[in-house]
Amino acid sequence: MAQPRGPLAGVKVVACSTAQAGTVPYVLMADLGAEVIKIEPPGVGDSGRQSGLIPGFPSTYFETNNRGVKSLTLNLKTQEGKDILYQLVKVADVFGQNFRPGAAEKNGFGYEQLRQVNPKIVYVSVSGYGPRGPHAKLPGTDSMAQALGGITEAFSTPGQPLKTGIVSVADETCAILAFGGILAGLYCAKTTGIGQKIDTSLLGGQIRLMGWTLTTTMWKEKNPVTGQARITGTAERPGMAASFNDANGKPFAMQLRGAKWKTAMTALGFYSKLEEMGLADLGLAVTSEHKRKALLKALDDLFAADMRDKWVEILRKADIVSAPINTLLEASNDPDVLANEYIAEVEYPKYGKRLKVHGSPWRFSETPVKIGVAPELGEHNVPILTSLGYSDAQIQELRDRNVV
């Protein structure tokens, strides 16, 4: 019986990309069946191979960002290396790069150069700031985009130093948006026969991630209240999203609209106590900073009397959205995460281990996702070059001259 093909089977990608934002779009495509050829410098490879190292394990950084792709080493400073790249681009659907702005053009694989090779190519460029603006030529990183894009402030605590998060939110957001852009570009190329360049950036991804809260901020021309709680809306139609600690300091979150406020507080046994304190009306917290602080302090004290599992269960039974605030390790073992295979296990014969890795955020009924592993440096040199018509002797000559 033939193995089911992934939904992107038949799509060919060539990627001269490093780091997360530049590689994860193609990992997602490889998961879905696309053939992704990653170009790496001979001998040294992608610098990510040396990041996230744990003794006895593959590189967590490289593995997460390059699983399921093929590795071809090419010295793109040589004409032979560029010629091989052009041959690959000629039969590819997508080309991706996240070099510092201007570097791809300087090295012979900018969009205008590659569209001459393949007019249908979907050319994806990921940058730090975007292709325009005063800082367009600067390199970018995850922390830079978190700082500029607003998420650092959005998740800050009043009175505490602002800091960028340990998880690469900007990189991953940009990567997922690039993935969506690629699919749109592929559809357009398929239906019109016209390729195009798609620009996306770390900063642009963070601005999109700020969502409706940014719209509200712009319309009001006033920054939102940050910290423990988001109390939104009007006095007549308030809403709350907040976190609290239980008796052991274990955090959990709850979110509701004003219509559910009395239901939630009654189920928890808090409503009468809040009435006695003059804090039973959530709408007051919208119009009064003093009332907001008093209400949050009262809820802090009430929730500190018992365990979060109890509070979360009560709220869920009352049809109120609530969940424990997981650590990363807790998230990787969460029953819903595991049941939906958002975490998968993959065999690594080289290391004699079966390891947990990212699963897929999607489930396709007819074309299942296949989770691969990251390639060894140059692992696919021979089959890829052979497919282009190179003989064994020619491949060895290219190897001897450090072209591959």
Image (tube, rainbow, N blue to C red):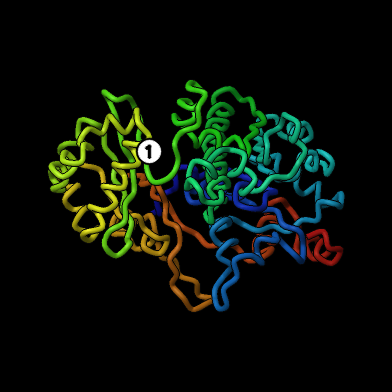
Q: Quadrant of residue 357?
A: bottom left
* Residue denoted by label 1: 230
Is 69 rendered above or below residue 258? below
Element class at badge 1: strand
Is 85 rendered above or below residue 238? below
Q: Quadrant of residue 338?
A: bottom left
The structure residue drawn at horizontal position 18% and vertical position 53%, both measured from the top left corner, is: 313
Looking at the image, residue 308 sits to the left or right of residue 1; the answer is: left
Q: Position of residue 255 (x, y in %)?
A: 29, 41
Looking at the image, residue 278 sits to the left or right of residue 135; the answer is: left
Pick the residue in front: 288 or 16.
Answer: 288
Q: Position of residue 309 (x, y in %)?
A: 22, 59
Q: Quadrant of residue 327?
A: bottom left
The structure residue drawn at horizontal position 67% and vertical position 52%, both measured from the top left corner, is: 18
Q: Position of residue 218 (x, y in %)?
A: 52, 24
- Which quadrant is home to the C terminus? bottom right
Kind of residue at badge 1:
Arg
Q: Is residue 224 visible?
A: yes
Pick the residue in front: 230 or 289.
Answer: 289
The structure residue drawn at horizontal position 66% and vertical position 46%, both measured from the top left corner, is: 14
Looking at the image, residue 392 sits to the left or right of residue 173; the answer is: right
